[in-house]
Amino acid sequence: MSTDLQNRRIRLASRPHGEPVPSDFLHDTAPVPSPGPGEALLRTLHISLDPYVRGRMNDAKSYAAPMEVGDVIVGGTVSEVVESADESLAPGDVVLGYGGWQEYSVEEVAGLHRLDPAAAPVTTALGVLGMPGFTAYAGLTAIGKVQPGETLAVAAAAGPVGSAVAQIARLRGARTIAIAGGERKVALLEELGVDAALDHRAPDLPGRLAAAAPDGIDVYFENVGGAVWDAVLPLLNEFARVPVCGLAANYNATSLPDGPDRSGALMGQVLAKSLTLRGFIQREFAPTMFEDFQREMGAWVASGEVRYHEDVTIGLDRAPEAFVGMLKGRNLGKALITLD
Amino acid sequence: MSTDLQNRRIRLASRPHGEPVPSDFLHDTAPVPSPGPGEALLRTLHISLDPYVRGRMNDAKSYAAPMEVGDVIVGGTVSEVVESADESLAPGDVVLGYGGWQEYSVEEVAGLHRLDPAAAPVTTALGVLGMPGFTAYAGLTAIGKVQPGETLAVAAAAGPVGSAVAQIARLRGARTIAIAGGERKVALLEELGVDAALDHRAPDLPGRLAAAAPDGIDVYFENVGGAVWDAVLPLLNEFARVPVCGLAANYNATSLPDGPDRSGALMGQVLAKSLTLRGFIQREFAPTMFEDFQREMGAWVASGEVRYHEDVTIGLDRAPEAFVGMLKGRNLGKALITLD
C-alpha cells in the first residue's frame, strides 16, 4: 500500500573510499508507503548531519551496524505528522525521529518524541537539547567528572558537542580551553566566554596550549584525534580523564599513518599518569541521565547561560555537499539540512 | 654519627640504555649511620625485585621520581630491627620497609610495618600479601570490576601480580585465561586451576586466545603490553575494562618501534567498543582498600584458596643478575633476594 505522494530521497550508492564523493550518493524518487498499525507518516522538516554517519557508510563493525548499499542515508530528523495510525499523534504534530535523508518517512510511533515548538525552537532537538548536547553532558558528567578549579580542554569546540562541553564545563567552574580551526570559529568561542580559545590551524599549537594550561589539563573531551590529541597528551595531569566521543580527524582515513608506532608509548602515558581513556556513545547513559539533562540543559538554554549556533543548508539535494563540508569542519555550529 | 657496622650496598652507577648491564651497578661498602629520633636501624633479610624499578632507573618523569646516579637501588624489604630510637619497635622485630639493595638501612619508624611471623611467612609481605597482591586486588576491584560469568585475561600470569589476578578473578566467578611465557609457567598456571593457560611463545597466540575466549574478553589486566596486547585488543567486548598496571615488554625499549603508527587505531577501538583504559598504581587505592585486601586475601592465602610461588636468589651481590632475569621473565613467581 502506498500513498499518492512521491518521496525524494538520497541513498548510499557505494561505500566511500576516504572522503565521500557525489557518486557515492544516489538521488531518486519512490512512492511513499502508507503507515501500518502503530506507525506514522511524517514529512521531514530538518535533517541532522553528524560525523558518526561517515562511520556507518563503511562496512566495518563499530558501535552501530553499517548501512547497506542502497539504504537511505541515516540521520536524526524533525518532522511534521502527515498521517498517524496511532491516536497519540495527530496530523500537524512536530516530532523528533530518525527519518534520514528523505522528504517523507514512515516510522514507529513508539520511537518518536513529540516536540513543543513553544518551549524551544524545534531544531534544538537535533542539537543543543538533543543527541549532541546530551553527548556533551553525559561525557562530562559520567566520565570527565570535571570539578571546579580543574582545567578542561575540548576540540571541535565550535561544533554542537564541543560548544556544549565548553559551556557546561565553564558553568561547573572549570578553566576551559576551547580549540577549533580558523579565526571565525575562534571568534565565536571567545564570544561564548571560554578562558582560552585556540586556533589549531595557527602555528605551534603545543606551545600555545601549554601556555593556556599552566596547571596542566585534567579533562580532555576527545572529539577529534590527530594533531590536537598529540598536543594535549603531554599536558595531561595525573588522574586526568579523557572521554572519547569522536575521532573526526580519522573518519576519512583509508590506511594507518606512517610510523613510528606510538601505540605502546600511548599506553605508557596511560600507565605513567594513571590516565582514564573511556570511549562512549551517549545512548549508554540515556536511561540514567537524559531526564537530568533535559531539565538542567533546558534551563541553561532558556536563560541564555548556554548558547548554540546552527549552520543551516536549505534543500535536501545539498545534503551530500553539506555533509562533506561538515566532515572537513566547514560548519559553524550544528549542521542541519532544512527542507525547502 | 655512625655505628661500627659496615654496609654492603649496590648503587646505580649509570642509567641503563635498554637492558641493564653489570657496569650499571656499583657494589661498595660504607659505614652504617646511627638512627636519629624516630628512626630505626634495620638489617635486611629479603629484598623485593619488581619491574617498576627499571623505570626509576631512567631519567624520565613517571609515576615515581627517578633514582639519581649514585643512589642505592630502591626496593621493598623485609628486615630485622637492630636498634630503634622509637619505643614502638624493639630489636628483633621483623618489619616491612623500603630499604633497597643494601645490608643495612636506617628508616623512619612511621614508614615501617611490623610483621607477625606466626601469621604468614614474612616474605609474603613482599608478594601475595604485599604490594603485588594488592596491585592485583585493587586493579581488579576498582577498575576491572570483574563480574561472575565474565571472561578475564591476564598476562605475566606466573608472576606475583598476574597469578593473584587470575586466582582472585576465578574466586569471583569469572572465566579466567592466564597467559605466560614457556611450558614451565603454563604448567604452574594449570595447577592453579585457571580455565585456560596459554603460552605466548608458542605459535598463533591470537588464534589460541580467540579459541579460549569464545564470548570475548570483558577484563584484560595489562601487565605486559606488546604482542599479548595486540592479540587481546580485537577480542575485547563492548564496555571491556583494561586496568593498566605494567608494560613490562616496553621497559627496556630505547626507541619507538617501526610503523605504521597504530595509536590512532587504538583510540578508534576505545571509541568503537566503549572501552575503559585506566592506568593505576596501587597506592592510589591503599587508603580505601588495603584493609579489605588484608582481610580477604589473608583469609584466601590461609585457606589455600589463593596460592603463591617465590623465586628466591641467595646473596645481595646477585641482585643485578636476578633483576635482569626478572625483566626477561625468567622468574617463576615472586622474585626475591634473600641475604646470606
Image: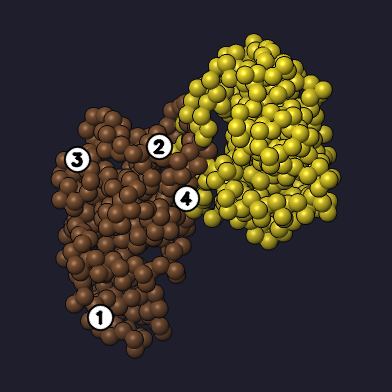
Chain colours: A brown, B yellow
- Position of the N terminus of chain B, as image quadrant, is top right
Residue A306 sits in quarter: bottom left
Q: Amino acid at mark 3?
A: Gly
What's the CA distance linking mark 2 and mark 1? Answer: 48 Å
Whichever of labels 2 and 1 marks the residue nearer the N terminus, that label is: 1
Mark 4–mark 2 CB contact (< 8 Å): no
Mark 2–mark 3 CB contact (< 8 Å): no
**Mark 2: secondary structure:** helix
Front-most of A239 and A223?
A: A239
Whichever of labels 4 and 3 marks the residue nearer the N terminus, that label is: 3
Q: Chain of mark 3?
A: A
Q: Residues within 10 Å of mark 1 (few under 14, many from 20)?
A: some
Q: Amino acid at mark 1?
A: Asp
- Confirm whether circles 3 and 1 share one chain: yes
Task: Point out which mark residue A93 bears.
Answer: 1
Q: Residues within 10 Å of mark 2 (few under 14, many from 20)?
A: some
Residue tagged 4: A278
Can the viewer see residue A246 in this picture? no
Residue B27 sits in quarter: top right
Q: Position of residue A144 (x, y in %)?
A: 40, 53
Task: Point out which mark residue A182 bears.
Answer: 3
Residue tagged 2: A233
Whichever of labels 3 and 1 marks the residue nearer the N terminus, that label is: 1
Q: Chain of mark 4?
A: A
**Mark 3: secondary structure:** loop
**Mark 2 or mark 3, whichever is nearer to me:** 2
Q: Amino acid at mark 2?
A: Leu
Identify whether B257 is placed above or below B214.
above
